[in-house]
Amino acid sequence: MNGSAGQTLDKAGAENFPVAPFFLPAAWRDDLMAVYGFARLVDDAGDGDLADPAATARLLGVEQTPPATPSDQSGPPAPQETAFRLALLDGLEQDLDRVFETALRTAGGSGAAGVDRPRHPLMSALVPLVDRHGLTPEPFRRLIEANRVDQTTSRYATFDDLIGYCTLSADPVGRLVLAIAGVSTPERTELSDAVCSGLQVVEHIQDVAEDLAHGRIYLPAEDLARFGVTEADLAAPSADGAVRELIAFEVERARTLLDRGAPLVGTVRGRLRLLLAGFTAGGYAALAAVEDAGYDVLAQQAKPDKRRLAAKAAAIFAKGR
């Protein structure tokens, strides 16, 4: 795998929860890292965080080139940058089509000769797990669509609107994990969606300052109005009392989602149970870090304590919720 793809996978260590922990079978770890690599690649394309966007565009056959203005400037991206990101996302979706075409031909016994194989190494890594687990394109397409939404939507009026975004940006990951483990049921999917949406809201809480620097506010506008918080308040170097009250309110909303979905852990056994306990505990530990910071998410990003995360994961594993 080339250096750029390796840099993308290296970001797994910065997540709130273990992506592919050591205690899982090697095949599971490989599959989960393949899903993570895809999700991270799509997010980086949508956020302008690719290590070499021009090289990625050439690899995918995207004719559009990145603008001369760096994409890491503060504020919303320029129209040319937005157009380039959308072109990259289109290129990734076309490469996703190649993934499923290759997997379909391989599963049918006709081999992949003559098939237009996926061009990006992180996309190629999806082929064996798509074939092995009979995955469908929908959850992958939703993750791409979430990043398209990010190019056109930078504010959310209500919490329901935000949860609607989470059905694209977060819930598909949990559904893929259940499919890889071979334990998908309607009941588990519903619980998984609650956990994943909760984890996404947690990330939005942690990243208020970072998101605003990129021109986005995920905190619902109705909540800002309720607590008398302006966008200028969110741009301050530290949170005032109104912002802290707002963040405390959002923390409880995120915790409610995690509480609603946490019983998912008790529906499975063995190492999968431990994995799901780790995912869920990561969310709770991040919320605890925000609380420990006095709900000031502007001064610095609150990161979960690893010992607290491990203890919470053990408790969730034992109780099954």
Image: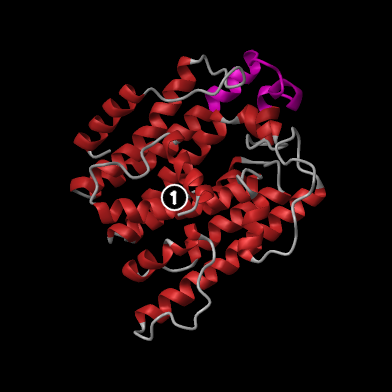
Q: Which residue sits at x=49%, y=83%?
A: 114
Residue neighbourhood size for the residue with mark 1, other residues' Cα within 10 Å, grouped as few (<14), some (14–19), many (≥20): many
Q: Quadrant of the C terminus?
A: top left
In the image, farthest residue toward the bottom: 110
Q: From which residue to which does the magenta span run?
A: 226-249
Q: Quadrant of the N terminus?
A: bottom left
Say whether residue 311 is visible: yes
Q: How many marks?
A: 1
Q: Position of residue 99 (x, y in %)?
A: 48, 69
Amino acid type of the residue tagged 1 in the rendering: Tyr
Q: Which residue sits at x=39%, y=27%?
A: 285
Q: Which one is in front, 216 or 89?
A: 89
- In the displayed structure, 2 sits above or below 141; it is above
Say whether residue 148 is visible: no
- What is the quadrant of residue 261 in the picture? top left
Q: Position of residue 200 (x, y in %)?
A: 50, 40
* Magenta residues, dominant SS class: helix
Please say which color scheme the image uses: secondary structure
Q: Which one is in front, 54 or 235?
A: 54
Q: Position of residue 272 (x, y in %)?
A: 25, 48
Q: Which residue sits at x=36%, y=67%?
A: 128
Q: Was residue 51 drawn as part of the magenta stretch in this picture? A: no
Q: Which residue sits at x=42%, y=78%?
A: 104
Q: Is residue 260 left or right of residue 87?
A: left
Q: Position of residue 234 (x, y in %)?
A: 69, 24
Q: Is residue 137 left or right of residue 183?
A: right
Find disc 1 in the rendering and name its residue: 36
- In the displayed structure, 53 sits above or below 75; it is below
Q: Was residue 240 drawn as part of the magenta stretch in this picture? A: yes
* Secondary structure type for disc 1: helix
- What is the quadrant of residue 91 in the picture? bottom right
- In the displayed structure, 48 sits above or below 105; it is above
